[in-house]
Each structure stands twice: as structure tokens, then as C-alpha cells.
Image (cartoon, helix red, strand yellow):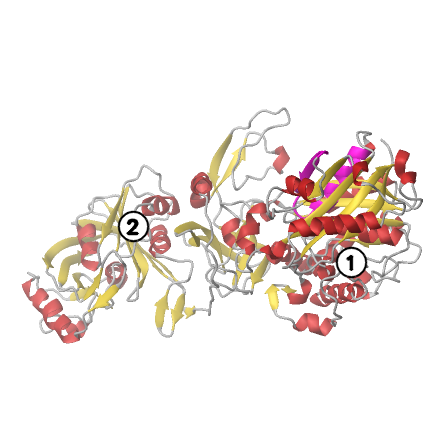
Amino acid sequence: MAQLVSIGTYLPPWQFGDRRVKGPDEDALTMAVAAGRAADPASTAQRVVLISRDFPLLEGGNAAVLLAGLSLPETVPVTEVLGGGPAVLDQIVGGESGTLVVAADDNEAAVGAAAALLGAEGEGAELSVASRQTRSLPMLARGADGVRHQYVDARLQREIGVRSTLARLDLPAEPVVALAGVRANELGHGFDTAQAAIEPAPSAAGAIRAIADAVQSGRAGLVLVVEQSSAAAAVLRMAASAPTVTRDEEPARELPKLRTADGNGIPISLPSYARAFEPKLRWEAATYDDMVDIDNVPLTPPRLRVDSAGQLLNYRLEPLPRTGTVYTHTTIRIPVPDLPSPYSLAVVALDEGQVRVLLKVTGVPAGEAQIGQRGSVVLRKIATRAGIPDYGYMFWPGKGAVA
Amino acid sequence: MRNVAMVGAGMTTFGEHFGLGIKDLLPMAYAEAVAHVDKGIERSDIQAAWFGELTTADGFPSGILADTLDLTDIPVTRVENACATGNDAIRNGAIAVASGMYDVVLVVGADKVRETATNVTFWEWAPLTRDLAWDYPLGLIAPANFALHATRYLHESPATREHMAMVAVKNHFHALKNPKAQLRQEITVEQALAAPLVADPFGVYDCTPQSDGAAAVILAAEDVVDRYTDRPVWVRGLGLGMDRVMHQHKKDMTSFPPTVRAAKAAMAMAGVTPQDIDVAEVHDCFTAVELINYEDLGFASRFEAHKLIEAGETYVGGSMPVNPSGGLKAKGHPPGATGVAQCYELFNQLRGESENQVDGARIGLAHNVGGPTAVAAVTILSSDKY
């Protein structure tokens, strides 16, 4: 049994036709950070579980980016779970107080992320195990080579994947209030889905998003999550205080046409990456004992400095504001090799001081940023360099502070 | 300090020299410079050399210069100071002569931008001026470096894209007469404004081309100048200015503080004011940069540069002729060579021998800014010793 105290969701602000799609600077990790910050804006989580089938760094490295993006200490344990919707429900109902469960999708069926922060008994909404079934019907198969193989037979999926699996569940006689990974009409008889929040696409985040809908509607009942021929069920009960639901979900705009010209790839220096990682991903600047030579403005990127007498100055890293105003900008119209073009860059004056930063623009089509426009900084993948995702912050014009 | 004179100057044409390597361009520039020494000069007279090259082609720069000109018996030093490399190389050579250490030195500048494929040039050159972890992956291409300044400049000043186009039209017009120039075709304001955008607010005609080329000057101490010419051009002022490298650390992006600092130092050394300058070769890698330069160099009051170009005052024949060679915009911009080539143009101007002669020019100013906008060099030359 777990207590949901806060839920955060994120959807990319883009669509292609009627389908939500991610931007070129997004992946499961950047979306997980957006949802996680929405769920835990005060960075209180004591452990993090990230569930996805689309981890960008299969050999390691996701956790450090996630913690930095969530402004959580490096000491917080992160568990990476390879799984879909049922695994998300497992992690929530089995999670301890202080756990932030983050689910992220970055594939053809679904993009986006959602996160749930678990609290102590008596807090938020209560989610308890109802039933579980794990069977095999790999209608979609993907191995280490990343190639997707599909077995096409919608009736097989419905009859064996869904109905036969659900028949094995031992479910209480309650209405379904949250349904994920399956359409209502695929369930067959015996399920009351009239009031259910439904996220039909196979995904990890859909489970949390459907729960968020149910919570916001104040509906208690059955949560049912299906993936291929596995299913998990839980019972949602409202407690004294309703969980906070924060949705970082801008209305979708048509994804601008982008072109990536062929190049030889963008090189990377990993020593340079490693030195920059903490301040770059944690969005921190250096404040020195003596700030006179730098006009009393904290310095980003941080570096060693000396005073007028040649003594090395001590400095401490302090968080930078995450909102600001465009001071100047440009839009690169020509196709730059290895970068999706066109794109905009902006020098942004951050709030609460005089720190300026040069950032790539995200969230709006290239060319929209204007001098004086306010917006927020968000974690994004700046570039892929020699196969390595290089994360950092971008500026989202017009975006209010989420967390 | 001793007075220093320029006794010879030369340059190759600027352009896409696919058929010529750096080892070809260096002897060509040197031969041109020697051809301009009125009384001739022997290689053995040269006691030291400075070579300005921003990147490297075919090996380490100092060695290449010594090798290609058979100057292996003298010290050769490479100077690299971003786009201010050329004028800084001259500054270093001139200081060595002024100090009394050498009587005659050679200064060469060269680069081959077109030596790599167009789709890799940016990523190969970008580490020269960008922080590898923070700025490099942003895709801050060369026009974007300056476009960030230009956008803010257009926002704060009355200048418009039309004024930028006027700069392009002027410099293309000036280049028509310059046989060394890369782009020798006249354009109109309408053409410039209608051209495809590269990085807002710069269209294709607001940008310098990518160029290969080399230039050379020979400097001599006042004590020995008579051996080489009776019409020397005097190196009157030298200035080099720096600024914070990253854009986010620049307080006011409508001005280039390195230019202000370099100009102040050079003008103080020369004992001249901006109004004394008869002709200037300034760094117009992008048109708006020329407008900002007018103000930073003191040719126009703050935010009034547009009036100069609007009134045609910076054409040859105007009150403050700028870039009679066509500038970087139309003559071309092989970075290491650019500043040296500016001084080649001024050498000719001050001796009354330019193809685009400014009548009665006696004091000339050369200026580079780069890195992307964190260093500037200013050289003031004159036909008058004092």
C-alpha cells in the first residue's frame, strides 16, 4: 500500500498530425526530469525509481542526469527499472514513503513522462495492490539492436493479451477509475469503465497520468494497467488530503520542419564534460569571497579565480534562477551539420540578479523569441556528441515557472 | 623606443585557392611585399619574422614559414589572437624593431579556411574560440556570434537592416576596383535585403565569404629605413584590447569594448584623434559589425553610425572613407592574413598608390575584432613620422 501525495506530468509541446511527439532536444531522461520536478518541486525525494523502456544511456549515466535535473543530492539512490505500465504500478504500490516514482516514454507509441511522490500513511491518496498477472505474448519485440519487430494481429492481442489475462485477475467489484495500456472496448464484459480516465497507448507514464485524472475527479475505484499480456490492478482510495497534481502539459503545436545536415559528428571531450557536469546540470553559479572584479555577479560557468594579490579565491556554488528575460537572440537558418536546424539562441538575463546565460531556445519554433520576452530554463539534450548525449539547459520563451 | 617604418607590403588575391597550399601562398605574399620595397631588399636583411595564422594547415606555423621562405637562420614566432591575429602579428614585429633588438623584420599572415569540407569547417574551427563544454555544442556558428550583438544593436539604436545592407553595397562597390578582392560584383540594397537569411538579422550579403590567402609586410627601424625607401609608411600607433570571452559575460552587447580599448591605446600612442583618421580598414566580417565599429572607433557618436552610411560618408570620396579595399565583406577574410592585408591597403593608400585612392590620405587605421568578440587590434599608420 502506498500514499500518493503529489503527481507531476509532462507532455512535449509538439504534435505531428494528431500525435504528440517530442522535440529534437528531448528524450526519456529530459521528460522524466520535467515530470519529476512537477511532482517534487521542493526536491524532497529520498529515493528515485525511474521506469522506462527507452533509457538513453543503457550502459549507465541516466541516474546522475536525473538527480541533477531534479536538484536532488548525489547521495539519493536511483533504481532504473526496465518496464511499462504494470511495472509502474508495482513500483508505486510497493514503494516506501519518500520515493519518487518516475515513468518516461520515448517511442513510437507514446512520448511523455509522469511522476508520483509517495508519502507517509494518512497523507494523500491510498493505492493498494489488487491483483497481478505476468504472461508472455511479445506482440512487439525489441532487442539490444534496437530494431522493433511487430506481430500484427489485433484480435490475438485483444483475446489472449487482454481478455484472457484479465480473466485470471482476482479483482474486487469496483468501477474502473483509471485504465492504461488498453482501450475500454478491449476489456470485454464485466468492467465498469463509464467513469474511467483512459490512457490507451502502451506506455509507462500513462498509468500515472490516468491515476492523476482519477485523483483530480475525486473518483475512488480500480486502477487497471495492461501491457501486452501482463496486467496489474490496484485500488485507489481518497484520504483526508487530495494529492497535488501538477501538469507540465502545454497545448501541442505542429513540430516545425527541421533538417539535420550530414557532418562528421560533433566531437566531445569527456574530461571537459565531467568538469562541467555539476554546475551545468545542477544550474549553479559560483559566488566568490571577492566579487569586485566580476561586478558582484555570480559566475557561470564557475572557475578558479585569483584576487589582486594573486591568492586563489574560495567559491561556493549556488543555484541559479530558472526564469529570465531575453536580452538578445539570433536564429540560425542555414543547415548546421549534425544539428537539427533552424534553431534559435538567446542571451537570457536571469531573474533576481544580473547573471546572463547563452542558451539554445526550446519549446517554440525557431525565430519566435523576442527581446524582453520572459520564459523558463528547462533541462534538455543540447546535442549528441560522438554518440554521447550532452545535457544542459535551454530557454523556453513564454513558459512560466513550473518547478 | 625607435620609430618603426613599413617599407614593403604585399598580398595574394583572397579567394578559394583550392590549387594553392599555405606553402605556395607564403612565398607569393612575400614576393609581393619585396616587390613593393622601392630600393629592394635581400632575404639576409631580415633578422626575425612573425607569422599570424589562426589555425594550422600543413604543419606547425612557425616552421612552415621558416621552411617555405628559407628563413631557418632567424627566429620565427607564430602569433594567434583570433581574428585580431594579423594586426597583432604586426604589433609584435613592430615592438621588436622599436625595442632595438632587430632592425628589419618580416610579418606574414595567412590562413586557408577552404582547406576542409564545408560540412566540417565549423566544428573544426569552433574550438578555437569556444568553451568546449558550455558554448561549443550550442551551434554558435560564426555569424551567430555577431548576430547576437547585431540583434541587440538594432534593438537599441535607430539602425535597421537597410543600413546593414548599405554597408554591404558600399564594400562590394569598393571591391570592384580591387584586383585582390574575392567578391567583385556590385549589389543593391534590395538584393541584400532579399537574400536568404543565414543567422538573423544577417542575410547572405551581410556575411564575409570564407577565404584563403596570405599577406606580408616588412618593417624597418628608422635608423635603416633609407636603405629601402624614401617613402616609408610609419607605424604610429599600436593597440590591443581584450574583453570577457563568453557572450553572457559581456555587459553591453551594442559595443565591442576590446575595440574601444585597442583604439584608445593606438590613438594615444600615435597622438591622433578619430577625426584625424583619413582612411580606415575595419573589421566588417558582418555588416552590422562595421556600424558598431564606427562608434567604437570614434567615427560616429553612440547609436549614430547609421547616419554615416546613410549619407555615404564612408565611401571613398566621403568624409570618413572606410574599407576602400572592399573590407572583409568583399575582399575576403582568411583570418590570419586579414589584418596584414588591411595594412597592405593602407600602405598603398598612404603612398598614393591604391586602386581606390582616398585623396591626400596621410593617416590610416586598421582594425580587427574577434575571438568571437573578445579581442581587438588597432594599427595606425601614417606617411608622416610624427
Quadrant housing the C terminus of chain B: top right
On residue A58, the disc is 2
Above or below residue B202? Residue B78 is: above
Q: Which mark is residue A22?
A: none
Tell me how far mark 2 sits from mark 1, CA to CA: 56 Å
Q: Is residue A67 left or right of residue B365?
A: left
**x, y percentage for residue A5?**
27, 50
**Pointer 1 residue:** B305
Magenta stretch holds residue B74: yes
Can residue B297 be seen? Answer: no
Chain to which the residue tagged by mark 1 belongs = B
Quarter of the image with the N terminus of chain B is top right
The answer for which chain carries disc 2 is A
Residue B92 in view (yes/no) = yes
Amino acid type for the residue under numbered disc 2:
Leu
Res. B292 image quadrant: bottom right
